Image: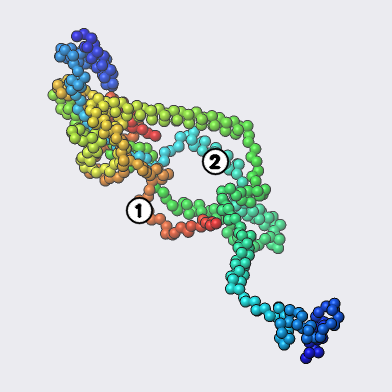
Amino acid sequence: MATPCVRQVVRSMWHFRHINGKSAALVQGILHFSSSRQCNGAVKPKKDELKAASQWKLYGAVCLQRLPLVSQDPHPVEEKFADLLHQLEVERSFLSDHEVRLLEDAERLSRKQEGEFDSDDEDLANQEIITAQDEEDAWEQKLKRFQPALRARGAADEEHSSVGRCLAESLVLLVQRGVEVGGGAERERVWMLPQLPWSPGETLRETAEKALATLPGTDLQARFLGNSPCGVYKYKFPTSLRSESCVGAKVFFFKALLSGGTRPTSEPGAFAWVRKSELKDYLKPDYLKQAERFVLEL
Amino acid sequence: MSSLLTRVVSTLLPRQNAMPCSAAAFVRCSHWFASVLSLKSSPPLRAEPRKKKKVDPRREIMARERLKKRLRKLEKVPPEFIPIEDFITSAKCFDEMRVRSEPRLSFEESERRALLHKEWTVFKHAQHQAEMAAIKGAMEAQRQALEELRLESEELYQAALAPDPGLFPFTQQGPSYTPPLENYEPPEGTYHDKTKVYTQ
């Protein structure tokens, strides 16, 4: 009797090592709980019974990313090196037609001014009325007349609910949900990636797609990247909410890229488009630890 | 008439037999003369006129064609190679007038360049390591997710492993330097394609 109990305990320990952020005491408590439950049960608990005993509620969640629309600002080292490369390229090159023309015009001008200009000698056929310098100035004027859109919008970048903020970085969609906290307390509003409980008869990817489609007040078109989840968050319910059939929940995340959609019309507090560096201001520590692994800022 | 005949005979025949018999006998001696009266029909004159063979015009035509064929073979030139413009160095590159004067780098400048190179290698190395670590972390997270899913249900696990047919071919518009302008009207005009097209 002792050996199978020990074996079960060892296996459970291996499972529970994956629970993140739980204190050692809590883990010990859980170990005692599970081992006593199994040892008191049938003579030799089978693997299926073990699975059925600690069942987890499944959720499908979507990690919707809006990829950057504008290139990143270069790092100071990158800027300096780019300048150096440009300098080297110019030094090692030959003179272009335009530069040759500039030099010739300058030379001709200097000769005119010094009075050594002999109009019979000069090759009048090749001369043009508009000098190269004039052309350059005209081009610059034309460029100045064109006003491109701004790369960084300044204050508008701080508005977390707008999808057009921080064009140079990729953003992730977060929603706020009421989560039941045990002990009779009211629901706590927690920020998380949009998720939906899994119902039997569909794949988890379909659950995630539904989670995105059923977001109130907006319709976002997304492209899902593959059928397999990119990450998982496993957590146990508070002791008061636990039951025989469900101990906790596993949330499987699926990656998707934003491809279009209208602005959300619901209250502004419900959505947030955040950069990876701002995730820590929104998500709970355990959740954040898992989410940071698959949200790439490359 | 007979005197003429005698004279003809005497010139034609050799004078071995001097004149034993008379002219008439002479005439009858030779087989050339079938009858006395029939004259002046030598074999070449008696033969039928040569008929023009029908094959001849065809033979001439064929001879002409053979000559033409030989001419054409000589004229056949192998097709010229299409020039690859990238491999042809333009004459402007060999123009000595276009060479820039070599810049004289001060000691500080060369030092600065060398140090900047080193800074760059360190920066890029760190960037690469960070990228590799991030990708590895993401892959590990996915592997753990699939592991957890397998523990839950084999069916869902197999569904997750199935390939997604709608994913490829995958296209995504990359970032530009400035975002697109709203209500922008591009200038009117068409492109004229001036690429040189060579045919062999």
Q: Say which element carries label 2.
A: helix
Secondary-structure class at tag 1: loop
Circle 1 residue: B183
User: Which residue position holds label 2?
Assistant: A86
Residue placed most toward the observer, A135 or A92: A92
* Quarter where residue A261 is shown: top left
Residue most extreme to the front: B20
The residue that appears at 64% across and 40% down in the rendered structure is B103
Q: Are marks 1 and 2 on the same chain?
A: no
**On residue A202, which mark appears?**
none
Q: Is B156 in front, or is B22?
A: B22
Image point 84% across, 82% down: which residue?
B20
How far apart in space, not on screen, are marks 1 and 2 (Cα)? 35 Å
- Residue at the image position 49 percent from the left and 33 percent from the top: A77
Position of residue B98 measured from the top left corner of the image (x, y, whole percent): 64, 48
Quadrant of the image for the C terminus of chain B? bottom right
Q: Amino acid at mark 1?
A: Asn
Please state the chain letter of the residue tagged with numbered disc 1 in the rendered image: B
The crowd level at tag 1 (other Cα within 10 Å; few <14, some 14-19, many 20+) is few
Up-down relation of residue B53 to residue A245 (above or below): below
Q: Report x, y in % for residue A169.
A: 37, 37
Question: Quick check: can you spot residue A297?
Answer: yes
- The chain ID associated with circle 2 is A
Q: Nearer the viewer, residue B165 or A273?
A: B165
Whole-percent x, y for residue B88 in the image: 60, 49
